Amino acid sequence: MPGQMNGCDWRWLIHTKNDCDKAVLEHHLLVLLLALIVDRLVGDPHWLWRAVPHPVVLFGKAISLFDAMANRDRHSAAIRRRNGVLVIVVLLLISVIVGAVLDRLLAGFSVIGLALEVIIVAVLLAQKSLADHVGNVAIGLRQNGLSGGREAVSLIVGRDPQSLDKGGVCRAAIESIAENFSDGVVAPVFWYALFGLPGLFAYKMLNTADSMIGHKNARYSDFGWASARLDDYANWPAARLSAVLIAAGAWVRMSWRAAIRAITASMRDAGLHRSPNAGWPESAMAGALGVSLAGERIYGGVVVREPLLNAAGRRMIDAGDIDRAIGVFFAACSALLVLVVLLLIAANAIL
C-alpha cells in the first residue's frame, strides 16, 4: 500500500506468514504499476546516464572482470565450462545480496523508499527506450534510405547490417521489438513480482551475462554455457506470456482476427526458432502483422539459415510495418499494465 515499505516487520496488523506473503506481493505489484507508468512516459534519460553509469553497465563491467579472470586462452574446454558455472553462480549471488540489502534499506524510508524503488524498477524496464530505438530504424529509412536504416538497425541487432536489404532491415527491427518485449519488459516484471529487487537484479545480471558471454563461438561456447542455459530457463515463462500479450495488443490496435493470427502463429511456429523462447513473441508479432520473419541472416560473416516464422505472410516489409509493430508493442505493454492492476486488485481483496 502507499506509504508502506516492502518488508513484513513494518506492516501494520500483519500476524501470519501467509498475510505477510500477500502484503509483499501487493507491494511488488504496486511498485510495478507505478514503474511501468514511469518507464512508459520517461524511458531512459540520456542526461542521467551521461552523469552516472546505468545499472546494466555495472552488471556488464562485473561480467567482463570475471570473464578476464576465469576465461583464459590456456584453459581447456572442461575448465572453461567449470569456471563459467562458478562465475554465473557468484554473479547471481552478488545480485541477490545487493538486491536484498537495497530492499531492506528502502524499507526504512516509507513513501520515499517506495518512490526510490519505483525508479529503480523503471530503470530496469525497456518500454519507451525499446520503442524509440526501433522507431529510429523507420525514421532512418524514411530520411536516409537504406543506409539510414542500416545504421539505425546496427545499434539494436547483432547481424551484419550491410548484408540487409530494405526488407531485411525492417524484419530485424520488428524481430528486435518482439523479442525484447519478452526479455526487456515482461521477464523483469515477472521476476520482480515474484521476488522483488533480488529477483529483478538476478534476472538482469543473468540476461546481461547471456548477451555478453552466452555465444556459441570458440571463446564462449563452454565458458558461457551455464549462463545461456540458465537464461533460457529464466525467460521461459515470460516468452509464452509475451505471445499472449502481443495477441492482446493486436486485438486492441488491429482486430480480433489479428489476435487469432498471433496466437495461431506462435503455437505453430515458435518451435522453429533456434531459441527456445524468442520464437514465441516473434511468431506472435509476425502473425499479428501478417508478415514473415526470420529466415536467412548473417552474423559475423557466418550465414545462419532458419525456417520462416509465419511463412505464409508477406515478405515485402517496409517502414510502415515497423510503425505497426510499435503500435502492437505499446498495446501489449498496456495489456501487461492492466494485468498488473487486476492482480493488485485481487491481492488487495484477499488482504
Image (cartoon, helix red, strand yellow):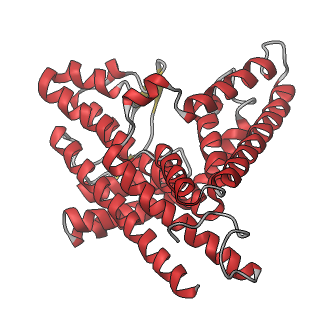
Residue at figure coordinates x 32%, y 34% from the top left: 133
Left/right of residue 143 with respect to residue 284 in the rendered view: left
Tell me which corner region of the image, top left, top right, bottom left or bottom right, holds residue 221. Answer: top right
- Could you tell me residue 152's position as x and y percent? 29, 25
How many marks are shown on the rendered structure?
0
Q: Is residue 143 above or below residue 102?
A: above
Q: Which residue is outermost to the left?
A: 143
- Given residues 280 and 295, the one toward you in this image is 280
Residue at figure coordinates x 53%, y 49% from the top left: 116
- Could you tell me residue 286's position as x and y percent? 31, 52
Residue 231 visible? The answer is: no
Left/right of residue 24 with respect to residue 144 in the rendered view: right
Residue 58 visible? The answer is: yes
Tell me which corner region of the image, top left, top right, bottom left or bottom right, holds residue 250. Answer: bottom left
Left/right of residue 213 with respect to residue 181 in the rendered view: right
- Given residues 3 and 77, the one toward you in this image is 3
- Which quadrant is the C terminus positioned in? bottom right
Q: Is residue 228 above or below residue 16?
A: above
- Given residues 68 and 31, the one toward you in this image is 31
Tell me which corner region of the image, top left, top right, bottom left or bottom right, holds residue 85. Answer: top right
Q: Is residue 108 above or below residue 96?
A: below
- Given residues 312 and 139, the one toward you in this image is 139
Q: Which residue is outermost to the bottom?
A: 350
- Could you tell me residue 242's position as x and y percent? 44, 59
- Could you tell me residue 255's position as x and y percent? 19, 68
